[in-house]
Image (cartoon, rainbow, N blue to C red):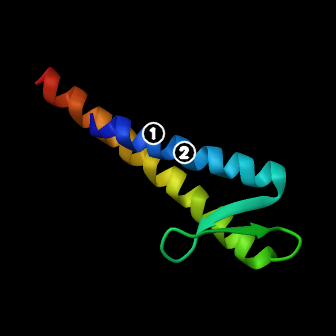
Amino acid sequence: MISSFFFALGAVFIWLLFKGYSTQEIMARGWGIQVRRYRRSSEPIMYWVTFWTYVVIVILCAAMGILMAIKTIANHAA
């Protein structure tokens, strides 16, 4: 159950990465409910910092999802 949450969260960030890379404009959260968009041409540092932060989040979500799935399978097998 928990592993599916991490996989779904990772899928959301994969979608944000794909959309950000293909349009050269990545969405990031601002203050409150505000959404910021960083363009690669006008704000390259914030664009790439946000991009690589999303990559790290995807890797962590995938690792946690896999570990939780393995733990669930191991508990049912024992």
- The residue that mark 1 highlights is 8
Q: CA distance from mark 2 to mark 1?
A: 6 Å
Q: Position of residue 8 (x, y in %)?
A: 45, 39
Quadrant where the image shows the C terminus:
top left
Q: Position of residue 61 (x, y in %)?
A: 44, 49
Say which amino acid is labelled 1: Ala
Q: Which mark is residue 12?
A: 2
Say which amino acid is labelled 2: Val
Q: Position of residue 32 (x, y in %)?
A: 48, 74
Looking at the image, residue 54 lies above or below residue 18: below
Extreme residue toward the right, this view = 41
Extreme residue toward the left, this view = 78
Q: Determine which quarter of the picture holds residue 2.
A: top left
2 lies left or right of 20: left
Looking at the image, residue 64 lies above or below residue 69: below
Q: Nearer the viewer, residue 69 or 15?
A: 15
Name the residue located 67 percent from the left edge and 51 percent from the top edge.
17
Name the residue located 50 percent from the left edge and 45 percent from the top edge.
10
Q: Which mark is residue 22?
A: none
SS class of the residue under badge 2? helix
